[in-house]
Amino acid sequence: MTFNSSNSLVILALVLVYIVVPSNAGGISIYWGQNGNEGTLADTCATGNYEYVNIAFLWTFGNGRTPKMDLAGHCDPYSNGCTNLSTDIVSCQAKGIKVMLSIGGGIGSYSIASKQDAQNVATYLWDNFLGGESTGIRPLGNASLDGIDFDIEAGGSQHWDDLARYLSAYSTHDKKVYLTAAPQCPYPDAWLGGALQTGLFDYVWVQFYNNPPCQYSANISNLEDGWKQWTSDIPVSKIFLGLPAASEAAGSGFIPINDLTSKVLPLIKSSPNYGGVMLWSKYYDDQTGYSAAIKNDV
């Protein structure tokens, strides 16, 4: 084959594309808010280890309940003690980090009773944490969070899809409301299985821990099979491998750093919708340095 200038330009363009387009690199999502000894939200974002921070939790809501938030030892939302978090939220967002409000959790009191209830909860979240305007003092101050994380581990399986639709409807050309979720790895998730089929969720960090049938063990095939099912069946652009950041952070499912970087990540990163790793939580990550040790491999 002879090469003319046109062919040379094509080859040059292909070389540039190869250089510029990154490999299937992912990011790290972290949960913050459940231990007062894990540092501030601003400090969390300043580490440079995380692309997503989930403020946990709004643990009571829906079905006529008065919404309640718990940020452990950080601040008291009910004495307006958390409004100064707005400054931290803005500093995180200035670094390109998405900051979500996580609703639910493992010990919360929550459920959605109907479509109307879903709309009411969505309105509350919009007015108090997103782009709306509350009639009172917003629990985290005036900063607008990037979206809502569904860490639903109770409260039945009904109407979470409705809540997702109502929240998504607040998105505009100028400001998107991101939706994320943290389902358990047994597929389909008992609570969010239906909601995740709406295609409205942007990022899904699946909890591959406290679930022996699909978490990592000496036989990696359990995790591999679970991962393949999630990445092939859920209409979402990015799926994350959810892990405890320390062996003490969960009952089971901790993956030693060397095993994660040498065995697990090479196995899952070939998925086109691989998004990265989610860690529970910032406090435990501080103890082990897990995120700092894995971030170049994620």
Image (cartoon, rainbow, N blue to C red):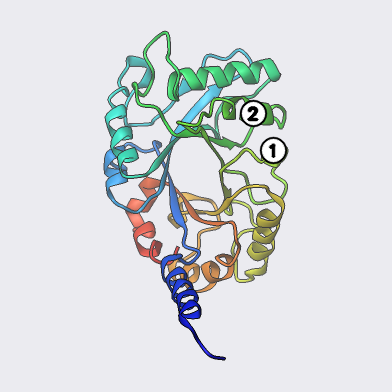
Image point 37% across, 52% down: which residue?
A: 285
Residue 40 seen from this side: no
Is residue 185 positioned above or below 55 on the image? below
Q: Is residue 52 left or right of residue 80?
A: right
Which quarter of the picture shows residue 63?
Answer: top right
Outermost residue toward the bottom?
Answer: 1
* Residue 118 shown left or right of residue 256 in the figure: right
Say which residue label 2 marks: 165
Which amino acid lies under the numbered mark 1 shown in the image of this protein?
Thr
Residue 198: mark in rendering: 1
x and y, in percent, of residue 241 in the image: 55, 56
Residue 117 on image: x %, y %: 65, 17
- Mark 2 near mark 1, Cβ–Cβ under 8 Å? yes
| Of residues 61 and 235, the one drawn nearer to the viewer in this rendering | 235
Query: Does residue 6 sit above or below 203 in this rendering?
Result: below
User: Which residue sits at x=58%, y=65%?
Assistant: 268
Seen from the viewer's position, the closer of residues 68 and 192 is 192
Give amino acid for label 2: Arg
Left or right: residue 209 versus residue 295 is right
Is disc 2 surrounded by few (<14), some (14 to 19) or many (20+) residues within 10 Å?
A: many
Residue 99 percent across, percent down from the top left: 41, 37
The spot of residue 278 in percent (x, y) is 48, 51
Q: Determine whether 289 is above or below 60 in the image.
A: below
**Label 1's element?**
helix
* Residue 163 in view in this figure: yes
Of the residues under marks 2 and 1, which one precedes in the sequence?
2
